[in-house]
Amino acid sequence: MLVAPLHGPPAASPVSELNQQTIGPYRAGEIPPPIVVTFRDSSNNPIDLTGYQARWVYQLHAGRGWADFTSSDAAPIVVSATVLNQTTNKGQVQYAWAAPDFGAPGYFEGEMWAGNGTNRFASVRYLWQTYAAISVPAI
């Protein structure tokens, strides 16, 4: 399981947080372990996400690198994520990657979102690059 950095500041740090985290790189056709994000409050305590829904949102850049998105970039892809058991995994949301997530080479950005209709939280931005594979074997 790929455990992403925690959402929110570490305990004894200012409220601002790191805005992005690089993961990968990957090859087209890979299916890495799920990404797990822990949403935390300003005191670094996991947020109880009971009753929340979660989404993983990601987007492919049209060009090289992670410049600001423009109208020439592909539309964002929004997929359901899982709010984990809040008794044993308080604040945690998981997305299990699927083959189409790594179907094309390029530069990607993604965010995990959790909301309950009243409150909505976003994770840090994740950046990754997917390279072309020589061939993806049937395994």
Image (cartoon, rainbow, N blue to C red):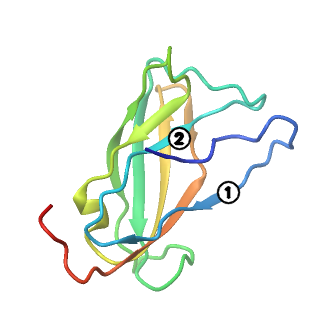
Instruction: Kindly identify the residue that appears in the image at 59 percent across and 34 percent down.
Output: 39
Q: Earlier in the sequence, mark 1 or mark 2?
A: 1
- Circle number at residue 19: 1
Question: Label 1 amino acid?
Answer: Asn
Which residue sits furthest front?
139
Q: Quadrant of the C terminus?
A: bottom left
Quarter occupied by residue 84 = top left
Q: Nearer the viewer, residue 109 or 72?
A: 109
Which residue in the structure is indicated by mark 2?
Answer: 37
Instruction: Kindly identify the residue that appears in the image at 31 percent across and 81 percent down.
Output: 132
- Categorize mark 2 by other alpha carbons within 10 Å: few (<14), some (14-19), many (20+): many
9 relative to 92 in the view: left or right: right
Residue 110 percent across, percent down from the top left: 47, 58
Instruction: Kindly identify the residue that appears in the image at 55 percent across and 47 percent down.
Output: 4
72 relative to 135 in the view: left or right: right
Residue 82 percent across, percent down from the top left: 37, 33
In this view, 28 is above or below 100:
below
